[in-house]
Amino acid sequence: MLKEYKIPEVYKIPLKILKKSKIDYVLFKQTEKYNTPIGGLDILFRSNKDYKRAMKVLQKNKYQSYLTEKNEPFKTMLIKYEKQFMLILHLHRRIAWLGIKTLNQKKVTERSKKMNSLVSIPSKEDQVLIHAAHILFENRKITQTEKKILKNKNLDDDYINSQLEKYKWKIFNARQHINESKNTNGKQISTN
């Protein structure tokens, strides 16, 4: 159920807690085909209310705050040892890096695709935008997995461009940049 997304099966435990509490979420860095082993599970919530409910129910189940929004706006990190494994949950109430909002979480959750009872992932267009933001604002390099995600040819470019424009990314055409940077092989990229 989670293995195909390269998520350890022990993560079923917190996801089942959220489902039982009727809290909708999207595993916002996962994709249908191209995933890498996770260091922590990134979970996006549709609203602040859902985010707060998730925090409350997980903390009630002994998940501890490790990093708060003081460390990174719009994101809280919870941890818990379960079956001799440290679960790391990154709870997001916005899609943002360094406090910069990059996409609308409500739109991303509405457009998400339910893969099974515990896994919903962003649409292919939102996957491209999320991973482009991850490259620009956090990693500053393109991984082989991200190259595969960004090369998807069956995308709604009008939607992608509307989001780029809405969030002031219009100066950066992510897909064009990826195509021009094919041979970086994980090296640092320029975002100019």
Image: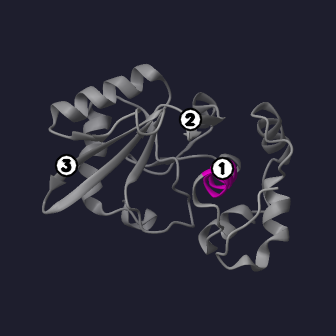
The amino acid sitting under disc 2 is: Gly
Residue underneath mark 2? 99
- Residue at 80 percent across and 47 percent down: it is 156
- Name which quarter of the figure residue 54 lies in: top left
Q: Position of residue 171 (x, y in %)?
A: 86, 45
Image quadrant containing the N terminus: bottom left
Q: Please, what secondary structure does the residue beneath circle 2 have?
A: loop
Image quadrant containing the C terminus: bottom right
Q: Label for residue 80?
A: 3
Give the alpha-carbon distance from disc 2 to disc 3, as whole Å.
26 Å
Q: Within 10 angstroms of label 2, few (less than 14), some, or many (20 or more) residues? A: some
Q: Label for residue 133?
A: 1
Q: Please, what secondary structure does the residue beneath circle 1 have?
A: helix
- Residue at 37 percent across and 55 percent down: it is 40
What is the chief secondary structure element of the magenta stretch?
helix
- Name which quarter of the figure residue 71 lies in: top left
- Residue at 56 percent across and 41 percent down: it is 98
The amino acid sitting under disc 1 is: Ala
Classify 88 as above or below 100: below
Residue 131 sits inside the magenta stretch: yes
Range covered by the magenta-colored residues: 127-137
Give the alpha-carbon distance from disc 1 to disc 2, as whole Å.
12 Å
Q: Nearer the viewer, residue 169 or 37?
A: 169
Q: Position of residue 83 (x, y in %)?
A: 13, 60
Camera-near label (2 vs 3) is 2
Q: Earlier in the sequence, mark 1 or mark 2?
A: 2
Q: Position of residue 42 (x, y in %)?
A: 43, 48
Q: Earlier in the sequence, mark 1 or mark 3?
A: 3
